[in-house]
Image (cartoon, helix red, strand yellow):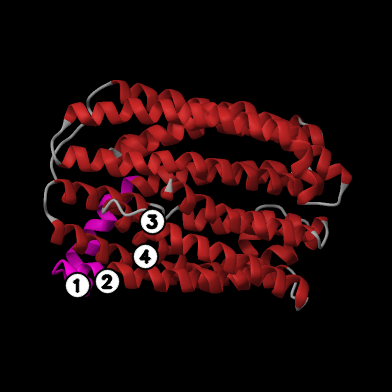
Amino acid sequence: MPALGALVAEPLFVLVDTAVVGRLGTAPLAGLALAGTVLTTAVGLCVFLAYGTTAGVARALGAGERAMAARLGVDGVWLGLTLGTVLAVGLWTTGPALVAALGAPDDVATHAVAYLRWSAPGLPGMLAVLAATGALRGMLDTRTPLRVAAAGALLNAVLSVALVLGLGMGVAGSGLGTAVTQLLMGAVLTRTVLRDARRLGATHRPSPAGLLAGLRTGGPLLARTATLRLAVLLAAWVAAGLGAVTLAGHQVVGAVWGLCAFALDALAIAAQALVGHRLGAGDLPATRATLRRVLGWGVGAGALLGIVVGVTGWWLAPLFTTDPDVRRAVAAALVVVAVSLPVAGWVFVLDGVLIGAGDGRYLAVVGVVTLLAYAPVALAVRSAAPMGEAGLVWSWAAFAGVFMLARAVTTGLRAAGTGWMRTGA
């Protein structure tokens, strides 16, 4: 439950920004959709900072190596700060080119670039949050990330309203509010990890060997995440080619999907930490029992969320936009999302289990397979689907249907065997 709260707080950033920016009109909302996709792609590629750190710390803890577990957490935070700084500079300088590559109209591109550049300074904080959260989860502490994430979500909401609507900064104000929030969250969680390291006798200084080990461990997870983010970018590109209404609707549906995905991912986080801990201790029966339990919860929670989204879609759409065409498109596409959520619950849980087991190489390989299964369908939708409501429905049927089913098959086949069940720290 604490993991659920912490994960849901993150997409609440997107939901709040979407609701506030949506009051400015369709072009600013479409710009936020493109910029948000680029930004979450950059951060998503570094999610190995959380996943790899969780798995490594959990295994070390399960094997009784508490000082080693703390040292892995410190190295992860330093790696996050370094990569975040590099990404911030890169996005600031290449933002216009990235937005242009996604095919945004001129009025949309202006807003997208503004959001990217004002939010980029927050990336070191965001990546430090990922690494520190992963370290704390590996220590089986999900309450500290919850408290920080909840405070961050509240602060982001206040700053977004004050800067966008109060001071009239527009989309740039939304990006600035998010950047300030991320930097403060990163500072708080980094301090927590360093305090725990001092208590357990680990150094605060970065270890070159530890940083390199983090990069090596994260390599397969980076490749796996790259295929996922390419699929998300492909979905945004498809929406951009079907008009401003479809693209604006894609932002709203994507925000709802993200909230549901992070809620389901709470089970994956629990499974990741518990599976890593049990494999570190060499307890294979407990590992298999954990797998069965979390899979049942994942599919059941996905079905429940699907019912909620399907029933409330017509009431959710007006919260994010005043455009009647966008509202109709959002409500229709949310039905597609609702149907796909039980499968998503299966996929996210198995992802967490295999990451906790350190099975990143397999996930990297099948990530390419699932992307290749989805890409032709996405291209067909962009070339043949009509603009507006129908286009948004077809776009999400391809992503939430074909892509997620391909992931469900590949992860299910792996979990049925024993090749991923490797023991020890």
How many neighbours does mark 3 have within 10 angstroms: few (below 14), some (14-19), or many (20 or more)? some
Which residues fall within the magenta stretch?
A: 194-220
| Mark sitting on residue 194 | 2
Q: Mark 2 and mark 4 in contact (Cβ < 8 Å)?
A: no
- Assign a secondary structure to mark 1: helix
- Amino acid at circle 1: Arg
- Indicate the amino acid at tag 4: Gly
- Using the image, tell me which numbered label, if any, was put on residue 143: 3
Relative to 381, 190 lies left or right = left
Let me know if residue 111 is in the magenta part.
no
User: Given the image, on which type of amino acid does mark 2 rest?
Assistant: Leu
> In the rendered structure, which disc, 1 or 3, sits on the residue that comes first in sequence?
3
Mark closer to the chain start, 1 or 4: 4
Q: Residues within 10 Å of mark 2 (few under 14, many from 20)?
A: many
The secondary structure type at the circle numbered 2 is helix
**First in residue order: circle 3 vs circle 4:** 4
